Amino acid sequence: MMIEDVMTKIKNGDLRSIFAELYGPEEEVLSYQSDRYLRALSEFSEVFPETASSGKETFLFSAPGRTEICGNHTDHQHGRVLAAAVDLDAIAVVSENDTHLIRLQSEGYKEVEVDLSDTSPKEEEKGTTASLIRGVAAQFISRGVDVKGFDAYVTSDVLSGSGLSSSAAFEVLTGNIIDHMSNGGKAGSIEIAKYGQIAENNYFGKASGLMDQMVSSVGGFVGIDFADPRSPKIDTHQCDLNKLGFSLIITDTKGSHADLSGEYSAIPKEMQSVASFFGKEYLREVDEKAFYANLAEMKKTPGITDRAILRSAHFFSDDARVPEEEKALDEGDMRRFLDLVNASGNSSAALLQNLYCAERPTDQEIPLALLLSRRVLGDQGACRVHGGGFAGTIQAFVPKAKVKEYVGTLEGVFGNGSCHILRIRPRGGIRVL
C-alpha cells in the first residue's frame, strides 16, 4: 500500500479499531492517534521524498513502553519480574529503499545511517541510536536473514529516561521492522526481545536484563521467569485497574540522568560478587537460607561489600514477591496487591538503594516524590521507585477519587505535565499496517 493510500485509510477511520485496542476507545484518543500517524506519514514524505514517491509499499509499526510492577533489578540475576506494556509507544513509517542501508530519522534528531555490510560492534557508536540499529540487524543477519535496507521515520511519546524504557521500545520497534520486512515475521516476540537485549548490552554498551525488551515485545501484564533466559517462562495476566477503581500514574521527577550507566552496571556486578561466593554465576542459583547463614563470612570476603550483601537480600525478597503479586492480580485482590507494591518499593529504597545517585547525594527528587505521594495516598494506594532508579520516575496506584488531588500535588512540585496517567496496553510490538 502506497503512502497516499495509507493516509486515506487513516482519514477514513479504517484504523480506528486497532488504535482503540492499542490506545483506548475514547474519541479524543482516537483523534489524537490518527493525527499523530498522519503527521508521521507526512514527515516521512519530507525526509525521504524519493522513497515516498517510488511506489514502494509503506508500513506502520508500533512498540510500547513498559512499566515495571515488581522485580526491581531481578531479571539480570535470572529472577522473576512482573511488568506491563503501556499506551505510550514508538511508531515508525517504513519503506524499503533498494540499498544496503538502514536510514532512520527520529523526530527531533539527526538522521542515522547504518551500512548492513558491516554489523560488528563499533566502539565509537556506543550509546547511540546507530548502535541499537546495527546490533538488532546483526542478530537477524547472524541467523541467515537477508536484511533489506529501508527508510524509516520514527516518533515516540515514551519519555526518555522515564523508566518506561524508551530504548527497549526502540529496539523492539527495529526488530519488528526487520522481522516483518526481511524475515516474514518468523522471529516472533520472544526472539525479538532477545535481539534487543544483545544490541543494548554488546553494541550500545549498557548492561541490562531482558525484562524491558520482553514486556515491550509481548504486551499486556506479563510475569516473566528468567531461570532459563534462553527460554524464559512467560505468563500473561488480565486485570482491569479501572474497574477496580485505580489509576496507574507515572511521575517524572525531572532528575538528571547524566552519567548513570555506572550506577546501573554496579548492581548486577555487586549481586554477582555474592553469587560467586557460593560458586554460582547468578543469585537465582543461590539458596536463600544459605545466603543468610553465611553473612558473616561474606562480610569478611574481599570484593564483597556491605552494599552488595544488601542488594542481594533485595533480590531474594523481591523475586519472591513476584508470584504473590501475580496471584493478587488474578484474584482481583487490590488490597494485597497494593501492600506488595509498597513492600517492593521499601525494599528498593532500603536494600537496593536506587532512589538517588551516590555521586549526587543532595539531589533526591525520587524520595521527595514518594514523600508527597504517601501524604496524598495514606493507606489507600501504593507508590514506589520506577524502573532502573537513581533519577527519573516513580510509580503510583491511585484511587480514582484521589487522582485530581494526586496530580495537583505532584505537578505542583515537579511541574505541569510531569504526571502521566497510563493505560495497560494488551499488545506488544506489532506491524500496525
Image: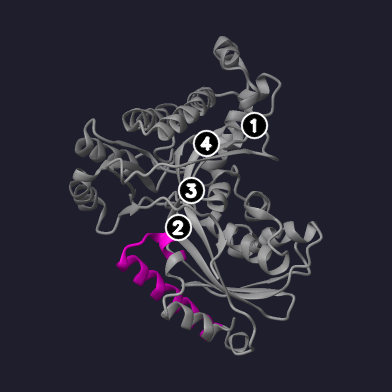
| Place of residue 426 in the rendered image (x, y in percent of width and height, measured from the top left) | 47, 52
Q: Secondary structure at mark 3?
A: loop
Residue position for label 4: 81
Residue position for label 2: 160
Residue position for label 1: 227
| Place of residue 221 in the rendered image (x, y in percent of width and height, measured from the top left) | 47, 44
| Place of residue 411 in the rendered image (x, y in percent of width and height, measured from the top left) | 23, 53
Residue type, mark 1 in image: Ala
Q: Residue furthest right?
A: 144
Q: Which is more foreground, mark 1 or mark 2?
A: 1
Q: Which is more foreground, mark 4 or mark 2?
A: 4
- Going from the N terminus, do you reach mark 1 or mark 4 first? 4
Q: Residue at x 64, y 38 (%)?
A: 232
- Going from the N terminus, do you reach mark 1 or mark 3 first? 3
Res. 340 visible in picture: yes
Whether the residues at callouts 1 and 2 have beta carbons within 8 Å, the answer is: no
Is residue 252 toward the left or the right of residue 224 in the image? Answer: left
| Place of residue 89 in the rendered image (x, y in percent of width and height, measured from the top left) | 46, 60
Residue type, mark 3 in image: Gly
